[in-house]
Image: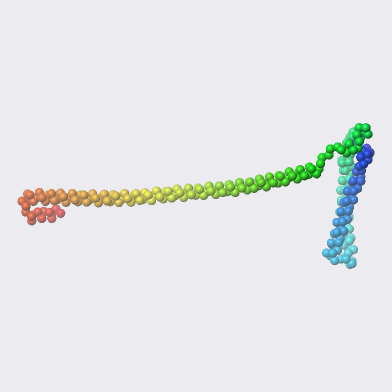
Amino acid sequence: MESSESEPIFDSLNLNPQLFINAALNIVDELIQSAFDHLHQEASTQLKVDGSDRAEDLTKGLDYIRNTIQSSLDKRLTMWEKYCFLRLFVVPEGFSLPKDDEASVGDIMDVDVPDLDSQLVSLRTKLTLAEQETGQLKREIQAFERESAINNHQATAISELTKLSDQISENDAFQELQKLAAELSMKVEKLKTEREDETQSARFQQLHLWNEDLLKIIGGNGKYTLQVSSMYA
């Protein structure tokens, strides 16, 4: 609906879009004026130009900066004002005010409008919960990473211990074999000695029997027996 067609409807609702836009533009002008007044005061204090020829130069310089900013800002605000009239303060096509017997202006104003404050609070609550969940998730990830690092360290330690245990077992087995070999060697030497002793004993015993037989043959000649014993010794 054209702007001229929308104005009667806004007037009937005691709404004036132009007053709203003018109030917004006035607020912007006041903010700029306040900002440059503060800037001029601070610059004069810092540069110590009060009462000197440089004070006029400072004023000219700040005015030039302000005019440059104001010119650019005015162009943007003009575009914003046109946008408001073309997009925001336009009554939809086919809209018409109800008659007095159908509805009053108060009824129109009672139309449910989303509570922006409630929505904002809800969004802030959701954002807080999301941040808390994100923090919790980060802590869980860090705990998992620490646990994983510990498990890897334990696995490495267990592997090293297993290798060391295998090496120790191999060394123990080798030492055990050496011990058994030494014991076996001792037993073989002992058995060999015992066999030699037995052989020597059997030899002496046989020689003794031969001596007795010779004595019987000779007839008990002790001298001859001694010589025969010495010969076979």
| Quadrant, the N terminus | top right
Q: How many marks?
A: 0
Q: Is residue 169 visible?
A: yes
> Residue at (86%, 48%) from the top-left corner?
76
Q: Position of residue 212 (x, y in %)?
A: 10, 50
Farthest residue, direction bottom: 52
Looking at the image, residue 62 lies above or below residue 88:
below
Farthest residue, direction top: 102
> Residue at (90%, 46%) from the top-left corner?
20
Looking at the image, residue 24 lies above or below residue 43:
above
> Residue at (58%, 47%) from the top-left corner?
147
Describe the colour scheme in one phrase. Answer: rainbow
Residue in the foreground of this view, choosing between 209 and 120: 120
Drawn side of residue 194 relative to residue 144, left or right: left
Q: Position of residue 49 (x, y in %)?
A: 86, 66
Q: Position of residue 4 (x, y in %)?
A: 94, 39
Q: Is residue 68 visible?
A: no
Drawn side of residue 168 relative to residue 50, left or right: left
Drawn side of residue 126 relative to residue 53, left or right: left
> Residue at (91%, 36%) from the top-left corner?
104
Residue in the foreground of this view, choosing between 173 and 134: 134
| Quadrant, the C terminus | bottom left
Looking at the image, residue 177 lies above or below residue 13:
below
Q: Position of residue 182 (x, y in %)?
A: 33, 51
